[in-house]
Amino acid sequence: MAREIPYIAAVQEAIRVEMERDPTVVFYGQDVAPSDEDPLVQAFGRERVRVSPISETAEIGMAVGLALAGYRPVVELLMTEFMLVAMNQVVNEAPRLRYMSGGQVKVPAVFKAGYGFTAGWAGQHTGSIYGMFMGFPGLKIALPATPADAKGLMAAAIRDDNPVCYLINYLMVLEHGDVPEGEYVVPFGEAAVRRDGSDVTIVATGWTVGRALAAAETLAQEGIQAEVIDPRTLNPLDTATILASVEKTGRLVIADQGTRHGGASAVIAAEVAEHGFGSLKAPITQVTALDVTVPYSEPMEAYVLPNEEKIALGVRQVLGEAPVAA
Amino acid sequence: MDQLDNDRLVWMFTQMLRIREFEERVKRTFEEHPGVIRGHTHLADGAEASIVGSLATMKPGDQLMATYRCHGYPIALGTDTKAIMAEIYGRKDGLCGGYGGSMHLVDPGRGFMGTSGIVGQGIPQATGLAFAAQLRNSSRPPTPEPPQVVLSFFGDGASKQGAFHESLNIASLWKLPVVYVMENNNYNVSTRSEQEDANAANGEPLSVKAAAYSMPGVTVDGGDPVAVYEAVGAAADRARAGDGPTLVESKVYRLSAHGNIIAPPGVPLHYPEHEAITTFGNREEYEAALRGDPVPRFRARLVEQGVLDPARADEIANAVTEEMEAAVQFALDDPFPEPEAAARNDYVYA
């Protein structure tokens, strides 16, 4: 049975449910349960729930070791940028060991972190940097855009036999939504069609899913029916659902909070350009953040980010109903 | 720690010889079969006593992680040398199917959980294995088997990596059952320790780093397998008792250069002389190391103590020569993997 809970509560619920069903799941990280009164500590004990020093390389490297030994660690890393401190473990160790061993070992680990906190956190804590992880085969990336997906994708991440960057959009943590109780798994690699439409496909990730849906309502009043697709995981990426939608609509707008170059949007655009070119009636439009470091001051921050209006404008452009900026 | 009986001492000598002969055959391959080995190999000649003395402390269920200089560990653990050589030759029946190569040997069934090709990065992974061992030790039903420990092998250079310091801090904080075995060969490729290590520059052993993390640090002659066994064994006993990690600095002398030369395709690869000679012009240092070679040193000691008959030692040496000749022949004859095997998605994704 579903009931309304916030996104952030859904994440915690998934961890608790998975720890209950699987004794090999362990949870640790910076500022995780420093108090013995923490509900997770009360439920699962200090062996499986630990607070770690600020040592990302050790935290993530230890997760690799735990995973090699048959455990399923969930590491709390707080901010995606903090993974940069331990980039070798994230991209050059965890996803490569299974392959380099010829399939002899596996690395089921979850790297849990927030991203996209464009709420005045300035240049080093606001990034939507997941695009860079797409170039590392073996490393999965989940970007839940609803409370239900926040739960279901975390459960799938924990059960997955590969390392997963499970990334929480920090702008969305208090958003409420229906979340199923008990065990609930959303499989990786299956995009969600959030809204049906026939005129244009909007592929939106994470926080921009909600912005795209709002833009679609505005556009509907103008007689434009937008289909909104949420890939839910970037790796694996459900290109089949995206291509099928583009085949139907003939037009593609991509909305992503990350940068334009080297980002998720560029990868999706390239897949559609190569495999769906025959369906396209207009050039693909990418509505992303600008290629700058996110600035602190609010008007400048807003200026560099995608939003509902920019997505709607992108749609009007691919439909030939608004001029394309020079 | 168990007493080393004569059989065990002979076993240790045999493993040292096997590692030495295997590494010699890797080195000879560059001359005898040019082009067969690609990329970069790193040999354990000179470190055999340290490797074997350490691994002799292992009990069922114990695990280890090592570095790119990794051939010796699986050899001593009983991995088929044909499979190891075939991996180094990039062949289909290599230990890792040709996916890993010389730097990335893995044999989880024998407790060898792998390596990192990046300096120091295996240390936190070994620490994670120890976290897992601690969870297993505390959750298992009563058993006569001893609690499990993990051995983490790395070089002196790795002790300047954050991964080393972060790992030792957490391992000590959480009393993880791990023994950190630093194989100090005094060279980071061609840079000497006193040029890059504050302790070494001040005439201190590198084991003093342990004090910063409130754990014991000991320095041992890594050319003496019994001394290594005793030092690592004492540390393993402490770890099994739940008292946490130890840093063991095992001083070895690498008898080959850091690795074969680095060159683009088409340039024949080979092993240059040791950096003591090529970089520092110090042939005497290298020749002194050769005079102290741990393998003949241990043989002489076992013969002198009456543990090993010279004729028996020769028999062992002959058997080892035959084994490694067979490994080379197997690897030469073994086909390459099908190119399409590179795209096996089940090795990338579960």
Image: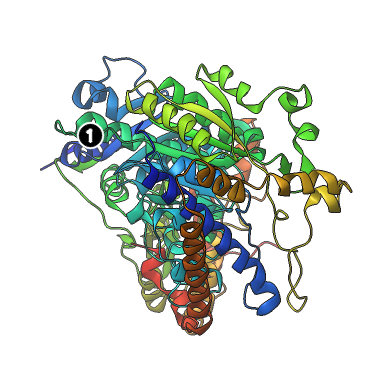
Quadrant placement of the N terminus of chain A:
top left
- Residue A129 vs residue A245: left or right? right
Q: Label 1: chain?
A: A
The correct choice, above or below, for B226 with respect to B76 in the image is above
Mark 1 nearby-residue class (10 Å; few <14, some 14–19, many ≥20): some
Residue located at (34% from left, 33% from top):
B2
Outermost residue, right side? B281
Q: Which residue is mark 1?
A: A16
Identity, as a three-letter code, of the amino acid under mark 1: Arg
Total numbered badges shown on the rendered structure:
1
Residue A281 in view (yes/no): no
| The furthest residue to the left | A1
Q: Is residue B202 visible?
A: yes
Residue A19 is left or right of residue B321, and the answer is left
Is A188 situated above or below B34? above
Label 1's element?
A: helix
| Residue drawn at point x = 71 percent, y = 22 percent | B204
Above or below — where is B197 with respect to B11? above
| Residue situated in front as seen by the camera: B201 or A181 | B201
Residue B122 picture location, percent across and down:
52, 44
Looking at the picture, the colour scheme in use is rainbow
Q: Position of residue A185 (x, y in %)?
A: 22, 51
The percent position of residue A117, horizontal first and vertical second, equals 50, 35
Quadrant location of the C terminus of chain A? Answer: bottom right
Q: Nearer the viewer, residue B82 or A26?
A: B82
Q: Position of residue A238 (x, y in %)?
A: 38, 66
Q: Nearer the viewer, residue A200 or B41?
A: B41
